[in-house]
Image: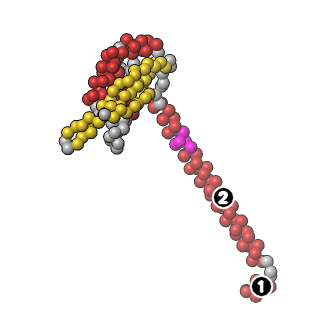
């Protein structure tokens, strides 16, 4: 039999080529079928996740207004040997964001009460970063002050409180 294959040059190459073409076509059809079956499910799952994620986005203010409170002092304390030591102050400027002119008027009218509430919250809350106790945690400060503003003005009057400027003054 080996003598017959040797006598017919190219006889084995055609069948090998046919085998390779068949394997490539089979792999291509299998991959296409797998993509058709499982690719649509992945796209549907991603679309479902995207649709479920959309309603969670909070609606922003339709008529954004802002009010600024300047130069509130945030004391910096450090614990040394069980005692709290005063190290200095941060002086911060705040921007209070509300929705609409009516809410802005409420913020302006309650200005002194808001400043008092902010100073009270600042003195009772550690607003420094946990990983760096000499640096002000801006996000934490904004959250605490927004909560305090809404407790003074009523829920959902204040949309956001931002620290627009922070200057550190050492002792």
Exactly how many numbered labels are in the figure?
2
**Spatial distance from mark 2 to mark 1, Cα to Cα?**
34 Å
Q: Residue at x 39, y 18 (%)?
A: 157
Residue carrying label 2: 28
Find the residue positioned furthest to the front. 171
Name the spot of residue 64 as percent of width and height, x first: 49, 20
Name the spot of residue 18 as percent of width and height, x first: 73, 69
Packing grade of label 2 (10 A; few <14, some 14-19, many >=20) is: few
Quarter holding the C terminus is top left
Q: Is residue 126 above or below residue 111?
A: below
Q: What secondary structure do most residues of the magenta stretch adopt?
A: helix
Packing grade of label 1 (10 A; few <14, some 14-19, many >=20) is: few
Question: Foreground residue, 65 or 92?
Answer: 92
Which badge, 2 or 1, comes first in the chain's sequence?
Answer: 1
Q: Which portion, as a residue range, is magenta?
A: 43-48
Question: Foreground residue, 161 or 157?
Answer: 161
Name the spot of residue 150 as percent of width and height, x first: 35, 21
Residue carrying label 1: 6
Q: Residue at x 52, y 37 (%)?
A: 50
Disc 1 is placed on an element classified as helix
Q: Residue at x 43, y 20 (%)?
A: 68
């Amino acid at each position: 039999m080996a003598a017959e294959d040797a006598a017919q040059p190219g006889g084995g190459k055609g069948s090998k080529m046919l085998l390779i073409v068949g394997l490539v076509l089979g792999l291509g059809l299998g991959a296409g079928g797998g993509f058709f079956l499982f690719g649509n499910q992945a796209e549907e799952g991603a679309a479902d996740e995207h649709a479920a994620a959309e309603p969670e986005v909070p609606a922003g203010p339709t008529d954004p207004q802002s009010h600024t409170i300047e130069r509130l002092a945030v004391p910096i304390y450090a614990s040394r040997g069980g005692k709290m030591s005063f190290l200095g102050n941060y002086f911060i400027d705040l921007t209070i964001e509300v929705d609409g002119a009516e809410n802005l008027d409420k913020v302006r009218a309650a200005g002194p009460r808001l400043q008092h509430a902010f100073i009270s919250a600042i003195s009772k809350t550690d607003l420094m970063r946990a990983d760096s106790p000499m640096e002000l945690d801006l996000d934490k400060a904004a959250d605490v002050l927004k909560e305090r503003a809404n407790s003074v003005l009523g829920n959902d009057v204040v949309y956001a409180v931002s620290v627009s400027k922070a200057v550190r003054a050492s002792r």
